[in-house]
Image: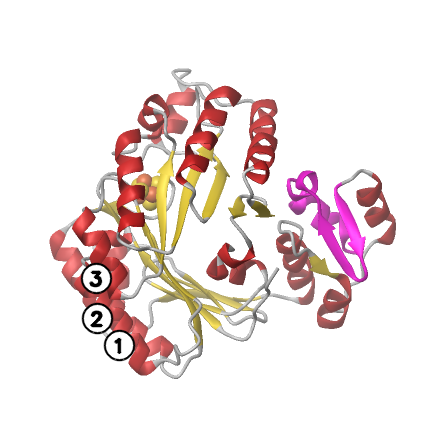
Amino acid sequence: MVIEKNYTGLYIHVPFCIKKCSYCSFYSIERDEVLLTRFRSALLAEMERKTAGINIGTVYSGGGTPTILPPEFWKKFLSILDEIADTSGVLERTIETNPGAVLSDNLAEFRKAGFNRLSIGIQSFDSSELKTLGRIHSPDQAIITFNQARDTGFPNIGIDLIYGIPGQTPDTWQSNLEKAIELLPEHISCYELSIENGTPIADLINKGELSKSSEEHCRKMYFLADELLKEAGYIHYEVSNYARGNENISRHNSSYWNRTPYIGLGPSAHSFDGKKTRSWNVCEIDGYLNLIENYKSPVEETEELDSQEIALEMLMLGLRWQAGVDIEEIEVRTGFRINEQYLDCMVRSGRVQVSGSRILPTTEGMLFADGDAANLIL
Ligand code: SF4
């Protein structure tokens, strides 16, 4: 597995969607032309302030639905970025989209604007599951969007799927996985549905109108994805992520897991210096726009991680992905030592393997990353 750390990732958060999904707890709002116009100028201004002279290795535009902004805007954004930052070694430029939120002609224009990777939020190929999730698209639209993306020449397409949807069974999940495999995407993310308080789906569960998937079902679905996707030639390189070959591992997301620096633009976007300082922008669009328009910093808060927090973070992130974590590196960087007794117990129970100074999680072990990380620190 390739682990690059000598660049900075750039994340751009576009908080607009056509309609709010019933499970969504991200900061996103329904599209509004006046706000969109102000937002475009604000993003360019924030990018110019934060990226001048920086060696950018990956660009990832997420949301929300970034394809709500027109391809001409992205063309301008990426060309200004090329002028002011060092983008000579950029590895990937990803844009997220959702079926039903982009026209086929536009997909070609996004490719021409400079994106070489498309991430499509398909979530499910089952119409009743899509309805439960409050998605705006149908299974057919998902397949059409994928095929159009392929036809327009995107060399790297990722799709997102969700398991643990109320009403979903391991059988319907299997059928989702089979449909995903038929499309041959370079990358597949399988996320367990997280039910967040205050979302419409949580309200329906609380009222007894929908039933949450059981832990046992979710566990079964996690292992089913591991089995079917590996059989189809995918590498399970992170707890929720599969790539068709090492070359298709998401470079940008890998930055988060190996603690590469990243800069976040847009409301609620986070930045990290690769060492111990993390900051995040204000969440609300109005506050973000007002700050940028008044030449003020949109950063809401900055935190400095102490050595224990850094050690814990290195372990939590490392135990979630195939590359694992280097215990010598943790000791050198933070002074914290590993609880050897607890590590032995993890090895004996099949959650990790140890190779030299690296702890490598198994498929089972990736599910226990957070708890194991906390117990590993002496
Ligand atoms: S498309 Fe994504 S970001 Fe937008 S509302 Fe749905 S889940 Fe949230």
Task: Reply yes or no: does residue 119 show up in magenta.
Answer: no
Give the residues in magenta. Answer: 351-378
Q: Are the two marked residues, 3 and 1, in contact with CB atoms closer than 8 angstroms?
A: no
Quarter of the image for residue 365 reads top right
Q: Are the two marked residues, 2 and 3, in contact with CB atoms closer than 8 angstroms?
A: no
Residue on which disc 2 sits: 76
- Examine the rendered structure and indicate whether residue 343 appears above or below residue 131: below
Residue 51 position in % (x across, y down): 37, 77
Between discs 3 and 1, the one toward the N terminus: 3
- Examine the rendered structure and indicate whether residue 308 appears above or below residue 375: below
Report whether 145 appears left or right of 355.
left
| Mark 1 element type | helix
Q: Are the two marked residues, 2 and 1, in contact with CB atoms closer than 8 angstroms?
A: yes
Residue on which disc 1 sits: 80
Residue ID at (75%, 54%): 359
Report whether 350 appears left or right of 105.
right
Query: Distance of mark 2 from mark 3, alpha carbons?
Result: 14 Å
* Quarter of the displayed picture in which ligand 1 can be seen: top left
Q: Residues within 10 Å of mark 2 (few under 14, many from 20)?
A: few
Residue ID at (32%, 78%): 82
- Colouring method of the image: secondary structure
Q: Is mark 1 within 8 Å of ligand 1?
A: no
Q: Is mark 3 within 8 Å of ligand 1?
A: no
- Examine the rendered structure and indicate whether residue 343 appears above or below residue 226: below
Asked if residue 290 can be seen in this view, the reply is: no
> In the image, what residue type sits under mark 1?
Ile
Q: Residues within 10 Å of mark 1 (few under 14, many from 20)?
A: some
Residue on which disc 3 sits: 39
**Marker disc for residue 293:** none
Query: Distance of mark 3 from mark 1, alpha carbons?
Result: 16 Å
Number of the front mark, 2 or 3 = 2
